Image: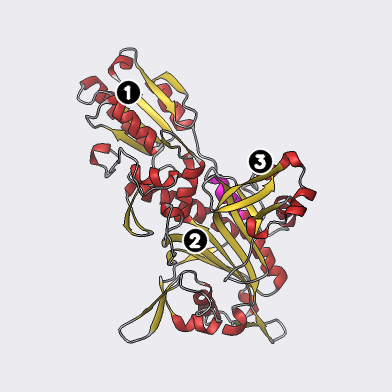
Amino acid sequence: MRLSKYFLPILRENPKEAEIASHRLMLRAGMVRQASAGIYSWLPLGYAVLMKIQKIVEEEQARTGAIEMLMPTIQPADLWKLSGRYDDYGKEMLRITDRHEREMLYGPTNEELITDIFRTSIKSYKDLPRNLYHIQWKFRDEIRPRFGVMRGREFLMKDGYSFDLSAQEGRHAYHKMFVSYLRSYKRMGLTAIPMAADTGPIGGDLSHEFIILAQTGESEVFCHRDLIEMPAPPVDIDYDGDLTPVIKKWTDKYAATDEMHDAARFEREVPEESRIAARGIEVGHIFFFGDKYAKPMGCTVQGADGKPVNIQSGSYGIGISRLVGAIIEASHDEHGIIWPESVAPFKVGLINLKSGDAQTDAACEGLYEKLGHAGIGVLYDDTSERAGGKFKTMDLIGLPWQLIVGPRGLKSGEVEVKNRKSGARETLSLDAALNKLSQEKAPS
């Protein structure tokens, strides 16, 4: 993509309304613009990151056998009344009435709707287990939306729902999502620590929040230091096998949010040198709630003995739009964003230091074409902006690599390659630069 043709409305000054780094940098980098309080338009750069995150989630869900679908944003209130949650959910739920005076709502989550779909479609134990998920915009009417996409009212979320015949099988489905989430976050360059959590309005007796440590987090968290360095489960893990050893590895060590924190247990179980008390950002939440929704909504199947059996279910959410902000909070410096390669909107920022110079233009055109043929995403700054302004823009938007081309280096047949994260610079021949950028790969 040529920057001269791209839509990238950069802000040179810090917006007054932005309280945290991710909000400030997303506005400055031209990723989002506020439509109203807590509701944002996603501009091309931000949307590209959003889609990269979504793709990772979809790939990791597919590994588990989960099946993607799509449910509507607007739901009938009758289903929520049937489950008993319509009045319990509170003012965060946006309740509306259509022209026929039917009560509707803008979905904050989808347990009722997916249970209704399942109960009217599946009748036999032979059709179990199943895990269905979708990625859809949600709305929760936060009393004080703040911190940009980190705590907005409208947000993009992956929410999935498992359906099993027994509690034991249901817990295995829960374990599959637990492992899948660990892998998803690692691929995004994040360490998300699973912490025992309150089930809240979703319900059930088993729940974990996935927390990224960050100074701007909304929750105070406590955990064992070893969890920060824990490697992700391997790509070839057997999701149909016994996942208990993997789960125990992550849950045997102390980890809790402030609402679940036991100070005495923390001091008893965690050596002083291994104690971490910090702030964290929630980027995912999973629940196993058994027949909480199946029972009142009559979601049953015929068992092997011919008798009706209440379905055992769980739900599993990942805040996809929130993750954009969370990644920035975890990966930025005083100059701007530092994108992990797996979610970067472009891998390389190609900087033409003297647009209009025939030799420089020709070299950049050749590099741009060859990188594109190699399947490498490139944002080519072909504008007439001064070199200092181009460097500031590239550092601000945080692409993993900068390929810097100028007439002085070209006299020797060389260009400069800069790694955004480390700041390391190398002077290489054009071919060597292409080889280096082609060989660098994001984790899978």
Find residue 63 and report its image quarter. bottom right
* Relative height, residue 402 to residue 272 (above, below): above
Mark 3 lies on a secondary structure that is helix
Image x and y of residue 296, in percent: 59, 84
* Relative height, residue 123 to residue 170 (above, below): below
Residue 352 is at least partly visible in this image? no
Disc 2 to disc 1: CB gap under 8 Å: no
Q: Nearer the viewer, mark 2 or mark 3?
A: 3
The one of 417 and 122 positioned closer to us in this rendering: 417
Q: The N terminus lies in which quarter of the figure?
A: top left
Q: The C terminus lies in which quarter of the figure?
A: top right
Image x and y of residue 268, in percent: 80, 50
Q: Residue at x 30, y 14 (%)?
A: 408
Which residue carries the number 2 mark? 158
Name the amino acid type tagged 3.
Glu
* Relative height, residue 431 to residue 179 (above, below): above
Q: Alpha-carbon distance for marks 2 and 1?
A: 41 Å
Q: Alpha-carbon distance for marks 2 and 3?
A: 26 Å
**Residue that sits furthest to the top in the current view:** 412
Q: Residues within 10 Å of mark 2 (few under 14, many from 20)?
A: many
Query: Which of disc 3 and disc 2 is earlier in sequence?
Result: 2
Q: Residue at x 44, y 46 (%)?
A: 20
Q: Alpha-carbon distance for marks 1 and 3?
A: 38 Å
Give, as a single range, the part of the protein colored magenta: 180-187
Left or right of 368 in this view: 199: right
Query: Which of disc 1 and disc 2 is earlier in sequence?
Result: 2
Which residue carries the number 1 mark? 405
Q: Residues within 10 Å of mark 3 (few under 14, many from 20)?
A: few
Image x and y of residue 120, in percent: 52, 82
Judge whether residue 186 is colored magenta.
yes
Which residue carries the number 3 mark? 229
